[in-house]
Image: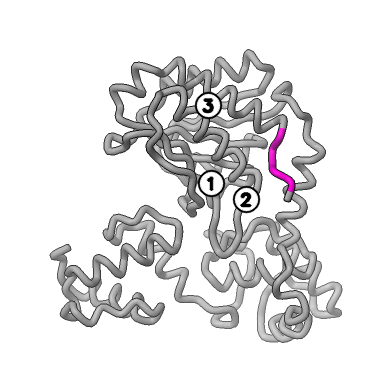
Amino acid sequence: MGAEGEAVGDLQQRLARLGLAVPDDECGRYQRATTEAVRTFQSARGLRADGVCGAQTWSVLVEAGYRMGDRLLYLRHPMLRGDDVAALQRSLGALGFDAGRVDGIFGARTEAALEDFQRNAALTIDGVFGPDTGQALDRFGTRVAARQPVAVVRELERMRRSPRTLQGRRVAIGDAGGMHAAAAAASQVLTAAGAAVIVLGHPEQAEQAAEANASAAEVYLGLALDPAATGCSAAYYAGHHFESPGGRRLAELVHAAVATAVDLPGGAVRGMALPILRETRMAAVLCELGPPPIVVARTAEVATALGEALAAWASTPFEDG
């Protein structure tokens, strides 16, 4: 609020193209209408709705401007991101080609699914989404557009086949801010239950996600201390009309167990697209707790509750129906 300049004007134009015009604000001035438009965009995209256009919001806003066919899509580093990538993943998944979760990030699984589609459609197999592949995808995709992506089906199948205990399961616990002691205590509880635990502490969410992926963890649980909170909130990945069933189930269990342990019923369970949830490749939950004095005083209870929640998740990792 109060910022001025070309960058603000660019922001306003991008918001307008997404149907979030700010007619009450002068072009190039970040006033009330712009703040509310940013907040609306953030809420719709699973971001923290604070009305401030920081690096994360700006990145997602740029991604939102891409439509399938606007550019060639292929595997590169850094990976291509955008709504066009998400649309491609959704279309491939509906046809039974597993591009992984619909996250709008063109990674190795998306490339493999695209090549598999090209092979089946008798196209040049180059892993590049261009006009010819787009036309073929349009022809087949109109018949199955409403189908559930195969990634959801396979996630459910993996969980069905998983052991119904924590014994030998790989768990990543992340200190997402001010919760080092709780992460260490939870690690001890889970290790005692037979889990193989890795504790992550990188301050950047994307780096923590990369570490969790590299560890081949089956589940990620991030812990953050929130000075403004009055209870426990648990977030799981949801974005681009996709959500992780395992993540949602774990978030519900974590919220119920921890809220009871700290005797603070505030907070909620919600789907979000924060980097730590979007970029991990397993069931993932970010648990935010506050106020700090109560949470710190009840670290042992929080750790025990997290152990109980993860044990319950291992026993029943999703709800049928």
Q: Nearer the viewer, residue 316 or 13?
A: 316
Relative vertical location of residue 134 with respect to residue 199 in this rendering, above or below: below
Q: How far is mark 1 from mark 3, CA to CA? A: 19 Å
Whole-number angstrom distance, CA of label 1 to CA of label 2: 7 Å
Q: Are marks 1 and 2 in contact (CB under 8 Å)?
A: yes
Quarter of image, res 148: bottom right
Disc 3 packing (10 Å; few <14; some 14–19; many ≥20): many
Q: Which residue is mark 3?
A: 199
Residue 156 falls within the magenta-colored stretch: no
**307 or 72, which is in the foreground?**
307
- What's the magenta region? 316-320
Q: Position of residue 178 (x, y in %)?
A: 35, 29
Q: Residues within 10 Å of mark 2 (few under 14, many from 20)?
A: many
Q: At 71% across and 35% down in the image, what residue appears?
A: 316
Query: Is 179 drawn above or below residue 62 in the view shown?
Result: above
* Secondary structure category for the residue under label 1: strand
**Residue 10 in picture, x, y percent from top left:** 29, 76
What residue do we see at 30% from left, 58% from top?
54
Asked if residue 317 lies in the magenta stretch, the reply is yes
Q: Using the image, determine if residue 315 lies above or below residue 116.
A: above
Is 285 left or right of 227, judged from the image as shown?
right
Assign the N terminus to one quadrant of the image: bottom left
Q: Is residue 104 left or right of residue 136?
A: left
Q: Amino acid at mark 3?
A: Val
Q: Which amino acid type is marked by label 2?
A: Ser
Residue 287 drawn at (x, y percent):
46, 36
Question: Real-space Cα distance between discs 3 and 2?
Answer: 22 Å
Q: Amino acid at mark 1?
A: Tyr
Does residue 7 lie above or below 102 as drawn? below
Q: Disc 1 marks which residue?
A: 236
Q: Secondary structure at mark 3?
A: strand
What residue does disc 2 label?
244
